[in-house]
Amino acid sequence: MADKGRTLAEKIWQEHVVRSAEGEPDLLYIDLHLVHEVTSPQAFDGLRLAGRAVRRPDLTIATEDHNVPTVNIDQPIADIVSRTQVETLRKNCADFGIRLHRMGDASQGVVHVIGPQLGLTQPGTTIVCGDSHTSTHGAFGALAFGIGTSEVEHVLATQTLPQYRPKTMAITVNGTLPDGVTSKDIILALIAKIGTGGGQGYVIEYRGEAIRALSMEARMTICNMSIEAGARAGMIAPDETTFAYLKGRQHAPSGADWDAAVAYWRTLVTDDDATFDAEVVIDASDLTPFVTWGTNPGQGAPLGASVPDPSTIVDDAERASAERALEYMGLRPGTKLRDIEVNTVFLGSCTNGRIEDLRAAAAVLKGRKVADGVRVLVVPGSMAVKQQAESEGLHSVFVEAGAEWRSAGCSMCLGMNPDQLAPGERSASTSNRNFEGRQGKGGRTHLVSPLVAAATAVRGRLSAPSDLD
Amino acid sequence: MEKFTTHTGRAVPLRRSNVDTDQIIPAVYLKRVTRTGFEDGLFAAWRQDPGFVLNRPEYAGADVLVAGADFGTGSSREHAVWALQNYGFKAVISPRFGDIFRGNSLKGGLLTVLLPESDVERLWQAVEEDPTTAVTVDLVEREVRYADVVLPFEIDDYTRWRLMEGLDDIGLTLRHAEEVEIFEQSRPAWKPRTLAAAD
């Protein structure tokens, strides 16, 4: 290995191997473990049953996000089962000495929003969480991936995970994004191209001119949805944009430590002579706003296109899947995507609930009104994002346009709290999954960028800002 | 974890691809803090349709699920594995699984078996023609067998051994606690910490 160039993922992997033995998975050290209320209770129970402690509470942090209501957050959670789950997390964190950001706390928020915001997400680290969107943190050049509850317990007990070395995939995005086209459109177009299983078994590294030009927020949006292409992790090599984002944050290194860290972080690039197991190239200049029409994130098309005709799909399984999807979505082949009317617009989630997303949507909504009969939920990804938005007056823009300004949480991305679609309701959503029933039983989801979400709110039909007067 | 060596049962043909974990168990069922009782949430939306394959009397009691490609994509919820197990499934066969779901299943003793699409199609046809067909999932021999058909499958030696012995992963890792300690001593001081040093 020493003589051969290594990819970014291989470098970080090697730095974290505690133990490697022929015929066994590598034992990887975990630098940061993020915990939330849904996938952790059974793990803490497991520790208690076995009489085990949390090995490194100082590398562990918890937040309440999936279940929390986004209104009346000063009141106890009305849903008793949700409340019990959140209270269970509070007890577990108290018993095992883990830092917790509770509902209402200034640093509370969606787990993948608070990690970067606190400066805990750093280049070259290994990060796990019992949540598939942990891939988000790869935007900083971290190796970050989602795990199940058994693995959560494993990390709590040992701060390590046995893992097989994944294959590597380079996704190069050349060119320059046209105006009105965002990183959300890149990732949606990419998933439509390679499919929901296209990245299965790989760690993706996003590269190229268009990626380098993106802000940290926009990079997080892309890495976030790596899992929707089947890849557990997606990453981007750290650069000046990354360092500028991190500098001065609460948990970022400072003084001489900062210099040492940056010197190391600069080595975190794929070597010129490294090889990837697979490569995909797309051109950003060709992209337009992209939306989904089906029930998996790979079933998408440019906004200017029409609902596809399943009978033209050659692959049997894909055709059957498209037929089912159209039936569930209540759509007919040939309908222009721009003619699809929505009841609800959701702006938020770990994909697009950051300050830049709110700014982009507010710029479209400023001086405009939400269409009659359309409900618009704006849910900041964290309380810090909420506070920042309010200091910039964005909340007034949303409220004056007729949108609801909420508190932080996962909210309608997955409808574990009261923010749900009713059966048959249709949304334009900046979240990551358009699965059947994801946003509420019988609900129909179209995944969109924050710009498309805002324009759709104004016209009541799937739209881009360029469609507005 | 219960040991898994070989299992023979009847099979359910789930002729769907891209069955994400939100379909296996919707989010509203994830609020419980136990590992049991998730069977009511299994395929909750689809089970409301009387014609759904799990509701058909000829497949009652079947405990091998045969699904289309990309089974278990999406959310990392291990509740999807628990729901399948709580309902009674011992093994799932598919041409491709979501990575996190596959990892979760093999940690928890639900055997997930990869077979090529053409083999899955033949197996679907066989159990649709005769739902009483006995299907054997043999981890020892790494084979799926039914009627006179023998289909080899691949699974790595380490995972196979762990499943056959019913071993707890954490226990295995703790045997190497000393190596973890040595590794920790080499970590740079500036790596992030969530608690102040005094804690």
Image: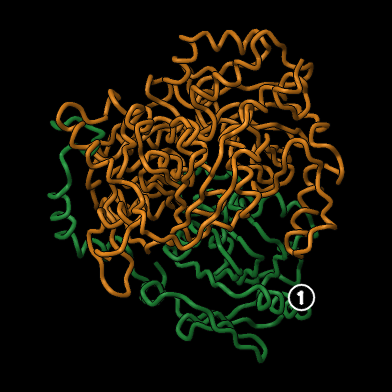
Chain colours: A orange, B green
Say if residue B28 shows up in the picture. Answer: no
- Callout 1: 10 Å neighbours few (<14), some, many (20+)? some
> Which residue shows up at 17% across the image and 54% down it?
B183
Q: Is residue A265 above or below residue A459?
A: below
Q: Quadrant of residue B116?
A: bottom right
Q: Is residue B129 left or right of residue A240?
A: right
Closer-to-camera residue (A214/B108): A214
**What chain does badge 1 belong to?**
B
Direction from residue A448 to residue B35 in the image, left or right: left
| Percent x, y of residue B34 | 45, 49
Residue bearing mark 1: B128
| x 26%, y 40%: residue | A59
Kindly indicate the quadrant of the structure image that contains residue A331: top right
Question: Vertically, is A72 above or below B176?
Answer: above
Comparing B65 with A276, the one in front is A276
Give SS at disc 1.
helix
Indicate the quadrant containing the C terminus of chain A: top left, top right, bottom left or bottom right: top right
* Residue drawn 75% across the image and 30% down it: A462
Residue B102 visible? The answer is yes
Q: Quadrant of the N terminus of chain A?
A: bottom left
In the image, residue A285 lies at what x, y percent?
62, 38
Query: Residue A237, how many percent across, how many down?
Result: 38, 43
Against A291, residue A43 (above or below) is below
| Residue located at (22% from left, 47% from top) | A55
Q: How many marks on residues? A: 1
Q: Amino acid at mark 1?
A: Glu
Whole-percent x, y for residue A396 in the image: 58, 8
